[in-house]
Image (tube, rainbow, N blue to C red):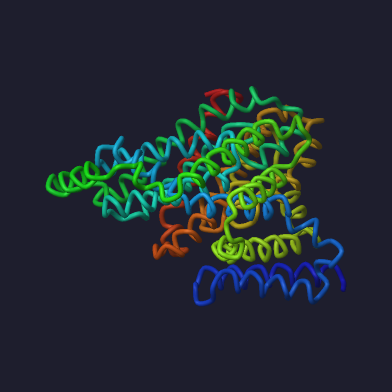
Amino acid sequence: MEQTIAAGIAVAVFLVTYAMIISERVHRTVAALFGAAVVLFLGIVPWEALPEHLDLDTLFLLIGMMIIVNTSKESGLFEFIAIKTAKFARGSPMKVLLLFSVVTAVISSVLDNVTTVLLLTPMLLYITRLMDINPVPFLLAEVFASNIGGTATLIGDPPNIMIGSAAGLSFNEFLFNMGPIALVDLFTSLGIIYLVYRKAMKISDAKRDKILSTLGELDEADAIRDYSLFKKSVAVILGVVMLFFIHDRLGIEPAVVALTGASVLLLWSGMDPEEILEKVEWTAIFFFMGLFILVGALVETGIIDGVARWILGYIGNTGEALIIITWFSAVSSAIVDNIPLTAAMIPLIKAMGSSMNVYPLWWALSLGACLGGNGTAIGASANVVVIGIASREGVRITFMDFLKVGLVIMFVTVAIGLGLLWIRYIGV
């Protein structure tokens, strides 16, 4: 098939699929799989190139952590932690929001975002049920905090790992440059969430007394349904977290760590694998597969690379580049996966090194690629996973529900980050 025709079809299929996802008339997984089937059937994505685009690291990491979480859940582990947290918050919705957001951001800075939300979302849903409050603002805050926290470090988000490797940037350089931005953006996003959902944050004195009374009657130890499984789950999760910290030194991929932990816990616990595997978010897994293939079609036809080169063709100096790269990567990452986008931008930024200082541009790319995911419900893996878990628990967050808050969060936090980078590297 001629390259121009293939590119046109790839763009058309992507836009139609995206329209179906936004309209919600077709389930997002069905829409993504249908679009993927079209580009595969037409040969736009060659079958032999499929493993390159499926991002098996992400898929297997998701599956492994979902197995660990669902097995651990049977012990009562998350209810135990949830009751502890609710008691610490003393029945205050705002304290719950703040506490969980900070914890999510910190964990996401050293662990994969998806792993973080897989561990924390069940707890958050349990707490909001316990307190009888609307879970939506808390779930949205968790998503935003996860994506913002992942921006802070070299290992917090896949684009940062790619950027650090390509530019030779250290862990401390990332922490020093992106850490302060993430901190400011985290509390800014919490302020926006509070303004949008402030009515849900306020409860009457009578309701607070009822919550405190209910919490006082609860003993977190009673939440443990299987003490043996509880201990095994804690041991495996701690082991997996430790391996995540040192996996690069051992030469082991995070996905391998997750799958190893999942298999060890299943074997050690003696749980029925069919029962556990039925609870894996397979709709989210297949949605990612479809989305990866669709983006793969844009990569194969040169669309992503071509658009990036076209945008960067208008750049004349480091200041202009800082603005354009930040906003282009942010808006693009809200629509397409940030991994292939980052892969397309890295060689272009390197090529600009002959005419300008590109050091600030690596931080611009990190800022846009990581925070752009907050813009839409499918902008980041953590978004899809949280919405999927919430849906299974009867909490519905539509594409438009997310968009109304997500776009504001994205534009405000990216603008703040860009402003701080500009002051530091360009001047007032």
Which percent across, then down, holds residue 73?
48, 52
Which percent across, then down, holds residue 241?
60, 36
Q: Residue at x 43, y 49 (%)?
A: 76
Q: Is any atom of residue 317 visible in this view?
A: yes
Q: Count the marks: how many?
A: 0
User: Above or below — where is 196 with respect to 181?
Assistant: below
User: Above or below — where is 283 with respect to 384?
Assistant: below
User: Above or below — where is 7 with respect to 82?
Assistant: below
Q: Residue at x 80, y 58 (%)?
A: 51
Quadrant for the N terminus, please: bottom right
Furthest toward the left, the residue is 206
Q: Residue at x 40, y 41 (%)?
A: 81
- The quarter of the picture where residue 317 lies is top right
Q: Is any atom of residue 400 visible in this view?
A: no
* In this rendering, position of residue 248 left or right of residue 324: right
Which percent across, then down, holds residue 236?
59, 41
Q: Residue at x 36, y 46 (%)?
A: 193
Q: Nearer the viewer, residue 21 or 89?
A: 89
Which percent across, then down, holds residue 351?
81, 37
User: Above or below — where is 226 with respect to 154?
Assistant: below
Q: Nearer the viewer, residue 343 or 386?
A: 386
